[in-house]
Amino acid sequence: MPTTFSAVLFDCDGILVDSEPITNGVLREMLQELGWDISEEECVRRFVGKAFLDEWQVIYEHTGHRIDMDWILGFRVRRNAALEARLTAVPGAVEAVREIASRLPVACVSGADRGKIDMQLAKIGLTDVFGEHVYSGMELERSKPDPAVYLVAAEALGVDPRTTAVVEDSGSGVRAGVAAGATVFGYAPGEPTYLSPEELTSLGVTTVFASMAQLPGLVA
């Protein structure tokens, strides 16, 4: 691990915003409407941190329905309405980002669609901190767990990805950060939509932390 980092690259969902329970709830409702009586636990395990288009086959196997872009756009409309009504920041995340950004370059690097990322950052008041350095894996040929979106972010910041700190919580995000050569910090607050410290460590996370208040001291 570098003694100092050139930049800190933040995932969005689960790191900056407490969106996963809301998003997962909408997805579960829509899968149940297709005939899949999926539990909350299984929905989290199968879909958190993953792109639906990559998971179309398992949805087809359980519902007989081949999801398409119309279905995904319908999901986004329902998801965004729920997020607009109920979204909050991860406790301490806004303060941690602002403190880190006062010392180091930062970027928001997400596997989500651009509209969702921008809406969520605006809702918690972090648009100004990240500025133009907001990156969506959906705008690239491959999203997380492919490292491309982290490599693009590092290049735009003018830094070597191997000297960056990546802050993640999902399996696909951790794999992307590790594959990019970054030092990955894993957030594990002990809630149902998050991986355990042991799971994060097994994926290649260097340091696991349970509170955003710890993060500035870990990366500075």
Image: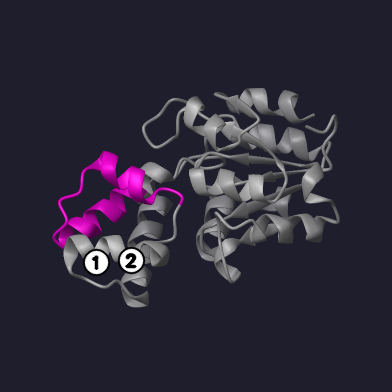
Q: Quadrant of residue 218?
A: top right
- Residue located at (59% from left, 70% from top): 139
Query: How far from the left and from the top, in percent, is residue 140?
Result: 61, 69
Classify 31 as above or below 208: below
Q: Residues within 10 Å of mark 2 (few under 14, many from 20)?
A: some
Q: Which residues are magenta?
A: 24-49
Say whether residue 66 is left or right of residue 213.
left
**Amino acid at dot 1:** Tyr
> What is the number of callouts on the image?
2
Q: Residue at x 58, y 71 (%)?
A: 141
Q: Label 2 amino acid? A: Trp
Q: Are marks 2 and 1 in contact (CB under 8 Å)?
A: yes
Which is nearer the eye, 117 or 218? 218
Please state the horizontal and vertical placement of residue 203, each as a whole percent of the image: 55, 38
Prevalent SS, magenta region: helix
Residue corresponding to mark 1: 60
Q: Secondary structure at mark 2?
A: helix
Q: Is residue 25 magenta?
A: yes
